[in-house]
Image (cartoon, grey):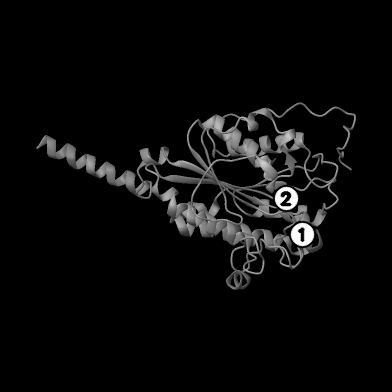
Amino acid sequence: MKKKTLLLISLVVATVVAAQTGGRDTVASDKRAPVFLTAGQSNTDGRVYAADMPGYLAAGYNHLNYADVTTKRDGHFGGRSFVGNRGRWSYCDVVNHLIDSTLNAAFYSIKAAVGGTSIDTVAGGPKRPSWYAGGEWLAANRAYSGDVATGRSLTKSLMDGFTLCVDSTLSRLPGGYDVKAIMWHQGESDRHAAADYYRNFKEMICYMRETISRKTGREEYMTLPFIFGTVPHASRQYSRGVEEAQRRVAEELPNVYCVDLSEAWLGPDNLHFAADWTERIGIRMYNVLVRIGAVAGKEIEEPAIFPPEKPEGVEKKR
């Protein structure tokens, strides 16, 4: 009789725990592989060459599984290479290094980025893909795969890429997976459509969250953390209207985090981040991941502030 009573109690406890966790095994959830998405335009794609790369990036990664789904989507992950003409790096490469060092376990990074792209369908020009997420436009446009004649939607590039990664790889992981955050930098190309940026930016974030939630069956992803950086004031494509719209969205939507980059220094083109600031932005993005609990680590101290004299080829804040 005592054994039957203990068995009954165990079954009741197990039922309560399952109800509280949505039926997911709590031990298994602790072992789920973290997944991070990154998207945007040129400063996300990367415009700093390997010659100015920190030594730790040149040394490579130990635990990163990487998929650039901008133009090619097969659901599989590989390594991150900085060799050849694509030997450029971005802030997200620094973020991945810090995650790699902190977790000391396998994690997955999915990225889509194209330079000169806008959320507005017109601002970037007819020959550029777009991040627009309006329902009718998405229904009429396929995912971008390198040629706007066959598809213009970059949002679909990222989301279709994510879906294929789930079907082919992530859903097959023994311990499961957990999407942690979306990281974003973009806005320069929308400077001529700043009046529409608030609506477009908000709509895009909601679409990404809804798509990920629907694919995974996890309602909590409807408020998946979204982390973005502002456009530096020194940029020749800076728009106060775009920045105000971004900050307004961060105030209104839950779990949207703004990284202030207003004082960031740029390279000679007065448009793309200088190498030292590319590293600095990666640290800032990573520190947000730590603060919100997406990565169980400690915040990283930023490098010492730059000397007061302007380095050659680098623009100061206006």
- Say which quarter of the image contains residue 83: top right
- Which residue is most to the front? 84
Residue 242: image tag: none
Residue 60 drawn at (x, y percent):
59, 33
Q: Which residue is mark 2?
A: 42
| Quadrant location of the N terminus in the rendered image | top left
| Residue placed most toward the observer, 286 or 90 | 90
Mark 1 and mark 2 lie on one chain; the one further toward the N terminus is 2
Work out whether residue 229 can be spotted. no
Say what secondary structure mark 1 lies in: helix
Going by the numbered disc 1, the residue's amino acid type is Asp
Residue 79 drawn at (x, y percent):
55, 41
Going by the numbered disc 2, the residue's amino acid type is Ser
| Residue placed most toward the observer, 78 or 231 | 78
Q: Which residue is mark 1?
A: 190
Which mark's residue is nearer the viewer, 1 or 2?
2
Q: Residue at x 43, y 55 (%)?
A: 167
Residue 25 drawn at (x, y percent):
35, 43
Image mark count: 2
- Label 2 CA crowd tier, 10 Å (few <14, some 14–19, many 20+): many
- Which residue is most to the left? 1
- Say which quarter of the image contains residue 198: bottom right
- Say which quarter of the image contains residue 291: top right
Work out whether residue 54 can be spotted. yes
Mark 1–mark 2 CB contact (< 8 Å):
no
Residue 302 drawn at (x, y percent):
71, 29
Q: Residue at x 71, y 67 (%)?
A: 121
Describe residue 47's horizontal placement relative to residue 13 as left or right: right
The CA span between labels 1 and 2 is 13 Å
* In the image, residue 265 above or below residue 161: above
